[in-house]
Each structure stands twice: as C-alpha cells, then as structure tokens.
Amino acid sequence: MEEQWAQLAEAFNDVEAEIICGLLQSANIPCRKVDRDALAGAMRVIGGQAYEIRILVPRRLLQQARELLRSAKEAEEQDLG
C-alpha cells in the first residue's frame, strides 16, 4: 500500500523549506517539498527563488510533525522575547 502524504506547511522560499525539512528529518519524520505550481521551478532558475513550496509529511506522522513545528516556534519566540 502506498504511503499517503499530507500538507504540513507552506514555505515561501528555499531557505525556509530547508529549515523546516531539516527539523523534520532530525526527528526522523520524512518530508517532501513540492512547488505549489508548475511555474515555480522556472522562477527558481530565473530569479533564484521558488515561491510557495508545500511541505508534505506522511499522513500518519502529521500530528507529530505539527507538534514539532509548534514547539520549535514557541522556543524561537521565547529566545526572541
């Protein structure tokens, strides 16, 4: 049976997408990056950035991934505040 994937987040550039995926991978949560539309790949080549990159995780790990991102965001806010 093929793994079902669900959208966890949307990043607005490659750096943000890599940070999110790195966090997920450090917790052994697989992820995929998918451009929101077909022209985003061309924009990456022309402008050096892609816009609206969808971050997908296996549906069975979606809640765990959400909690991980929430914890990371809370930790960042505490560091800044």
Image (cartoon, grey):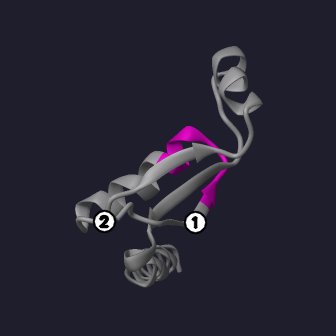
Q: Is residue 28 magenta?
A: no
Residue that lies at the very extreme toward the top in this rendered image: 46
Q: Tell me the amino acid under the disc marked 2.
A: Ile
Q: Name the amino acid type tagged 1.
A: Gln
User: What residue is at 76 percent from the left and 29 percent from the top?
Assistant: 39
Quarter of the image where one finds residue 3: bottom left
Q: Which residues are magenta?
A: 10-17
Residue at 33 percent of width and 59 percent of height: 30
Query: In the image, what residue occupies the spot 65% across and 30% down?
Result: 49
For label 2, the crowd category at 10 Å Cα-Cα, with few meaning under 14, some 14 to 19 and many 20 or more, is some
Q: Looking at the picture, tell me which residue is in the foreground, 73 or 79.
A: 73
Residue found 37% across the figure and 82% down from its top:
64
Disc 2 is placed on an element classified as loop
Residue that label 1 marks: 7
In the shown orientation, is residue 29 left or right of residue 57? left
> Residue 32 at what x, y percent from top left?
45, 50
Q: How far from the left and from the top, in percent, is residue 62? A: 45, 77
Which residue is farthest front?
A: 1
The residue under label 2 is 29
Helix, strand or loop status at disc 1: strand
- Residue 67's label in the rendered image is none
How busy is the neighbourhood of tag 1: few (under 14 within 10 Å), some, or many (20 plus)? some
Q: Are marks 1 and 2 in contact (CB under 8 Å)?
A: no
Q: Which of marks 2 and 1 precedes in the sequence?
A: 1
Task: Locate residue 20, reporting x and y percent.
Answer: 45, 58
Which picture quadrant has residue 31? Answer: bottom left
Is residue 16 covered in magenta?
yes
Per the model, the C-alpha gap separating discs 1 and 2 is 13 Å
Q: Nearer the viewer, residue 80 or 76?
A: 76
Residue 54 is situated, as x and y percent measured from the top left of the image, at 61, 53
The image shows residue 49, relative to residue 42, as above or below, that is: below
Q: Is residue 32 above or below residue 30?
A: above
